[in-house]
Image (tube, grey):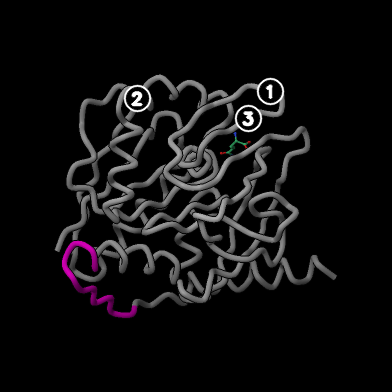
Amino acid sequence: MKLKICHLYPDVLNLYGDGGNIRCLTQRLRWRGMEAELVKLPIGSGESLAGADLIFIGGGQDFEQQVLLGDLHRGRDKELCAAIEDGVTVLAICGGYQMLGAYYETHDGQRCDFIGALDLYTVGAKKRMIGNYMFRCADALGGMTVVGFENHSGRTMLGSGAEPLGKVLAGFGNNGSDGTEGAHYKNVFGTYSHGPMLPKNPDFADLLLRTALERRFGRAELEPLDDALERMAHDEMCARLEREKT
Ligand code: GLN
């Protein structure tokens, strides 16, 4: 069994080692005797998203988000919306997550019109939201706790068409005020959790793989892996964030 993973805009949206998530997904497939085919789609790429099982979009600064707008609106926007409606699994982080919404208005008033695939918009503020954080995924997604690192100026507000990915347990999440983190729509998982978030959140990594495998093959047999080290990293960060609360 093989999954086709497309890395969209690896040239501009790939902060803090976000791309490490692809290595994690690929390795977790390999450990189970499956494979991943990786296709990179930088700005200007003529390659299509056709046949993608999983699309990964990392984060970027306001500048990079503006740089990619021309390319995005030359057809990538429609292609991405179609893939999302078709149920392709998407992991989108921070700037990549914001890009799936209607728009991002930077703190100094510059507006980036994005693709509107998800019912949300983002407005920047001068004070950035930075730090390690954690959230609990919605029950329908397994209710696992996810630990991560966030660094954003944008405050994201969800409309009625997008469910939050989870609830903030420590840190800021979508906007620092309504307690929501990320968004979930069809098979899209949008989050502010930067860097290689999947290695230290193995249950969340497997949720993505299961979603993509079930759509492609109608079933997903994910035999358990020895995740002792991964869980130790996860639990240590949960404990640290709990300690910092008091
Ligand atoms: N530019 C966006 C913000 O600051 C995204 C930042 C990021 O991806 N880290 O809100």
Residue corresponding to mark 1: 109
Quarter of the picture containing the N terminus is: bottom left
Residues under numbered marks 1 and 3 in contact, where contact means CB atoms less than 8 Å apart: yes
C-alpha distance separating marks 1 and 3: 6 Å
- Whether residue 29 can be seen here: yes
Q: Type of residue at label 2?
A: Ile
Alpha-carbon neighbours of circle 1 within 10 Å: few (<14), some, or many (≥20)?
few
Number of marks in the rendered image: 3
Task: Locate residue 28, reporting x and y percent.
Answer: 31, 65
- In the picture as drawn, the residue positioned furthest to the bottom comes out as 224
- Residue under the point 63% across and 66% down: 167
Alpha-carbon neighbours of circle 3 within 10 Å: few (<14), some, or many (≥20)?
some
C-alpha distance separating marks 2 and 3: 22 Å
Q: Main secondary structure of the magenta part?
A: loop
Select label 2 or label 3 by which is in front.
3
Q: Type of residue at label 1?
A: Gly
Select label 2 or label 1 by which is in front.
1
For label 1, the SS is loop
Is 218 inside the magenta-drawn segment? yes
For label 2, the SS is loop
Is 110 inside the magenta-drawn segment? no
Using the image as rendered, state which of residue 228 and residue 45 is in the foreground. 45
Residue corresponding to mark 3: 105
Residue 82: assigned label: none
Q: Type of residue at label 3?
A: Glu
Residue corresponding to mark 2: 43
Give residue 31's quadrant in the image.
Answer: bottom left
Query: What residue range appears in magenta?
Result: 214-224
